[in-house]
Image: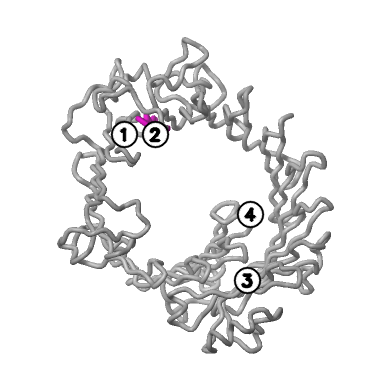
Amino acid sequence: MSQDAKQAGNNAYSYTRYDAKGRVTEVGELLSTEPIDSLKAKINTLNWPDLNEYTAYDITKTVYDKPHTHADSTFLQENLRSRVSWTAMIEKDRQDTVITLYSYDEHGNVKGLLQQIPGLAPKRTEYVYDLVSGNVNFVMYQYGYDDQFIHRYSYDADNRIEYVHTSTDAYLWNREATYHYYPHGPLARVELGEYNVQGMDYYYTLQGWLKGVNMPGDGDPGADGINGLRTGKDAFAFALGYHADDFKPINPNAVTSDGRDQLWNRYDEQRGTSGLYNGNIAWMNTDLPGLENDPMQAMIYNYDQLHRIVEARSLREYGANGFASRNSTPKAYDVDYSYDGNEDRALRIAPVEQSSSGPGCRVGITLQRRNEQVSVQDDFEYSYYENSNKLRNVDGGAGNNYQYDDVGNLVSDASKGITGIEWTPYGKIRSVNKTDGTKLEIRYDAAGQRVEKKVGSLFKDMSGMPPEIRWVFMKRIHWLNNLFMEARDWGFRWQVHIRGTAL
């Protein structure tokens, strides 16, 4: 049992129950005005707290060994001994429960998972493993049902994933991705789609640091979209620079962004060095061919002695000899950062200067970012509450834009019109209220994964609508992607997580 500062004001406690084997069976938030000494005397009782005697919210139940008695009868739970059989999330002010059931193979691998999410029929995901390696060969969502969707995975001799295929009927398969590797192990190339709509080439330094993906400008390692190659032209590319000797291709004729684009010369002009040897990125060159203006741009970075970024300078003027030199005059997309003396301390308790932010409030941490027209787009001066690491505002003024609860959770943001944020005892957002009446509500399962998001304002009156139109608004379903479905009515919009790990 424990109690934080927020719970202390509400006669609340976080509690954990265990079974006779010491396994966690229940956690939640307990409400009680009983003296603390009385509660302490009971905590070693196996069945304490008895929820017939106490009020508790946000209860997470974990059951072992025995199958769920009211689950879908077609879902067979097997090999449950000493394993989690099912979990349930009983949320505050909710009349329904999010339940997840498990089934295992003889090796203890999860072979089946059934999710009972309010508002949806039970959804199942099944897994098929390789008997020798233990690799996942198939992930089957709703197998045998109208909405089934199957992933098939293939591996090479080193157990690295090689192919990913998907199917809606287990007969016709679409190749989603193909993976290629260097002889020494790292990922070399990924080809996306049945018809290779994109090829992404990866290359690294001797230290294993990522040097780039594809190649800005000409010289793509995979020659994608060049000379009739049946792979789409790269939609993006970037290269990173650490120090002047960080990368040397095996092929001496291979094109690199380092030399061709004069990036180390530009870096030396700005910094007076040949790069960094500690892993910090000295420059980044990005190529986005879809942009109409200046598709290739570079940024040069500067750090202080504590490895904090203090400056980013853009390079946009590109010609036959690479990027042109630039002076100290501000350019588009330049960024400047500054810090005070305590930004890395857990508590900001050092003496500070008096400022417009008020007595004891720290200032000095700033961020200034310019837009394409070289105008200052963001000009932030971060001010913190006294003796705290909690942000007060970003304009350096005296206003308290950000408000927090007793344990440091953000509860309001005046600049964004957020009037209230409610948190669960597990540190996750339960709801967000805004000044325009919009309310966002989020639900989670016992593992803390988001299973539902509902966002909208109060229901509008539909009494005057024809019944058939009202039904369309209440029942219209829109598939966002393979992970989420969205149901919209006249006033609310839901997103419901239907399989896998929540985004």
Pointer 2 and pointer 4: residues touching (CB < 8 Å)? no
Query: What amino acid is found at the position of numbered circle 3 in the picture?
Result: Thr
Disc 3 target residue:
60
Pointer 2 and pointer 1: residues touching (CB < 8 Å)? yes
- Residue at point 72% right, 36% down? 154
Element type where label 2 sits in the image? loop
Cα–Cα span, label 3 and label 4: 19 Å
Check the picture and name the quadrant holding the N terminus.
bottom right
Disc 1 target residue:
301
Query: What amino acid is found at the position of numbered circle 1 in the picture?
Result: Tyr
Between discs 2 and 4, the one toward the N terminus:
2
Query: What amino acid is found at the position of numbered circle 2 in the picture?
Result: Asn
Between discs 1 and 3, the one toward the N terminus:
3
Between discs 2 and 1, the one toward the N terminus:
2
Which mark is in front, 2 or 1? 2
What is the x, y in percent for residue 364?
22, 52
- Residue at point 26% right, 56% down? 382
Magenta span contains residue 283: yes
